Amino acid sequence: MTATTRTTGSADTAAVRRAISSTPRPPRPGRLSAALVFGWRGMLKVKHVPEQLLDVTVTPVMFLLLFTYLFGGAIAGSTSAYLDYTLPGLLVMSVLFTTVYSGISLNTDLTKGVVDRFRSLPIWRPAPLLGSLLGDSVRYVIAGTVIIVVGMALGFRPEGGFAGAVAALALVVAFSFGLSWVFSVLGLLMRSPNAVMNAGFMAIFPLTFLSNVFVDPTTLPGPLEAFVDVNPISVLATASRSLMAGTPDGVAIVVSLAVAAGLAAVFLPLTTRLYRSR
Amino acid sequence: MTTQTPLAIEASGLGKSFGTTRAVDGVDLAVPAGTIYGVLGPNGAGKTTTIRMLATLIAPDAGSARVLGHDIVTEADTVRELVSLTGQLASVDEELTGRENLVLLGRLLGYSRAAARDRADELLDAFDIAEAAGRLVKHYSGGMRRRLDIAASIVVTPRLMFLDEPTTGLDPRSRNQVWEIVRALVAEGTTILLCTQYLEEADQLADGLAVIDRGRVIAEGTPGNLKASVGTGSLQVRLLDPGRRAEAAELLERSVGPVVLEADPAALSAVGADAERAAIAVAGLAHAGVPLAHFWLQQPSLDEVFLALTGHAADEAADETSPTSDTLREHAS
């Protein structure tokens, strides 16, 4: 106590004052460019934590291997026949699973306080939300590409060729863009990222299995078949399958896009409202 | 719009409830432009909620406020252009590097890519975080994170800055660095609203001060007259020779006031000492040939301020129905 050394801050006061005074205010950014900056933020996160992509690609790849080799023969007679049937569906599943992570990352942001900073900025209000979903779309594309590439390594050859595979991927990503607003709302309502994950997968898991992703619904009991037929995930899987096969199913494609637009129309305004008031 | 605003913040009757809790219950504030205004209060007193309303993050459900002449509800967007916020939780992105955080904000404020990078580098240098610029913020020390947080708030120099407990949890060196930065900001013309739990921090920085308790302003003034209203501090003395403590106690009792003998056999303190009486008392000790190891004048603590102003200790303010509050009160008095 007797020999107290007084430590003062080492921040260079002159430099601090220079940095404070040298700022002419730039003009406000446009709406789109603000959203794109948030998209860039999403990309940076993937760059720093590439493992988060593993989370969303490993599960579908596991399902692909499991279903193809364990059940493929029993379900479709041969593994290669089953792969042709199930791969377009697994593409749907892998990308839809990724949408849950949009809600999780939004919730994580909210628990960290960085959202307060964004909300105190003079920017277009929906920009952070729109931007992070733009960033997430890149993850959807990566998740979908992984599934298609692994499928092709296992012998999957789409009739529709490269163009068919790209079209199927584009459709699934467009659908996910609409669906992800549902998980954004969940992300804004739930208390923790873990709760969002549990609730999200509790919804998306049964919905994916109770669709035509893995089995032909005509083999199912009547009421279940009826449900599977109207499940939008079935419609999307049908559309994806038709595009990969080179025989686009116009109705399924239009219905898929309409469902996506409908989800966005309801949940996007809800998301912006909740984001503002939380 | 006038260029000279006499008041940076004028709030009247500002209120906000969360469920059945009245977090802020009619706060009036008048903060002169170009000053540091302290809002002092314990946890849960309503400081953060007040700041969040003034920074347009949440809307008040009672009263109104103007920030730099603009209404916080109807002109929220204009207010956002003029203020910035450094929250209690560090408002930086932990998953990004320090540099990325600043570039991100620069871009969001309208800088071109190159200009945002230049500005980020300038701030990183000035705030002594250049070395850690490429590291993820979640690996930063508390002090570095705070400095980055403040740097992020001045990517464009704000006219008004909200600082919510900027030094809570920091070591003394980091705390001094933050204080230096705050002083530099005011010197360059920014008004600062500083929320703090520490009387010392308010004393060091603030020109004016409001004490908040249970969502209301219970006292206002300068740190000096607030402390004066609370009562004087105590003169703390440590002797070289513990054997002469009785003699010293007698002298101090005569020239200052009631003496407390500390657990340390060489230490004692006299309550009710202002600077002048303390000086006379210390001179008296020297005159009597009682050798001193050291002495200092201790300011009243936040607890003492609260006790004097509210009749209850600071740490129980958040929970008035607590069954232990009576015991605490007895304990404190």
Image: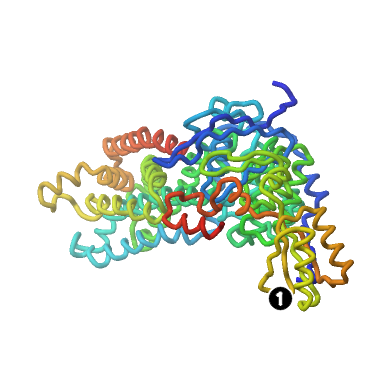
Residue at 73% in and 61% down:
B270
The amino acid type of the residue labelled 1 equals Pro
Q: How is the image coloured?
A: rainbow
Using residue A19 as the reference point, say whether residue A34 is left or right of it.
left
Residue B203, x across and y down, in percent: 72, 49
Residue that appears at 87% across and 69% down: B288
Q: Where is residue A114 in the image (x, y as percent from the top left)?
A: 55, 47
Residue B12, position as x, y percentages in the image: 57, 29
Which image quarter is the C terminus of chain A in? top left
The picture quadrant where one finds residue A62 is: bottom left
How many numbered marks does the figure carry? 1
Measuring from the top left, give residue B140's x and y in whole percent: 63, 60
Q: Does residue B296 appear left or right of residue A207 in this picture?
A: right
Residue drawn at point x = 43 percent, y = 42 percent:
B21
Kindly give the residue lying farthest to the left in the view shown. A222
Taking depth in this image into account, of B291 and A25 the one nearest to the observer is B291
Q: Is residue A135 left or right of residue A203?
A: right
Q: In this view, does B33 lie above or below A184?
A: above
- Taking depth in this image into account, of A154 and B212 the one nearest to the observer is B212
Q: Quadrant of residue B159?
A: top right
Q: Residue at x 40, y 36 (%)?
A: A268
What chain does mark 1 sit on?
B
Whether residue A163 is visible here, answered yes or no, is: no
Q: In which quarter of the image is the N terminus of chain A?
A: bottom right
* Residue most extreme to the top: B1
Residue that carries the numbered disc 1 in the rendered image: B265
Q: In this view, does A9 lie above or below A30?
A: below
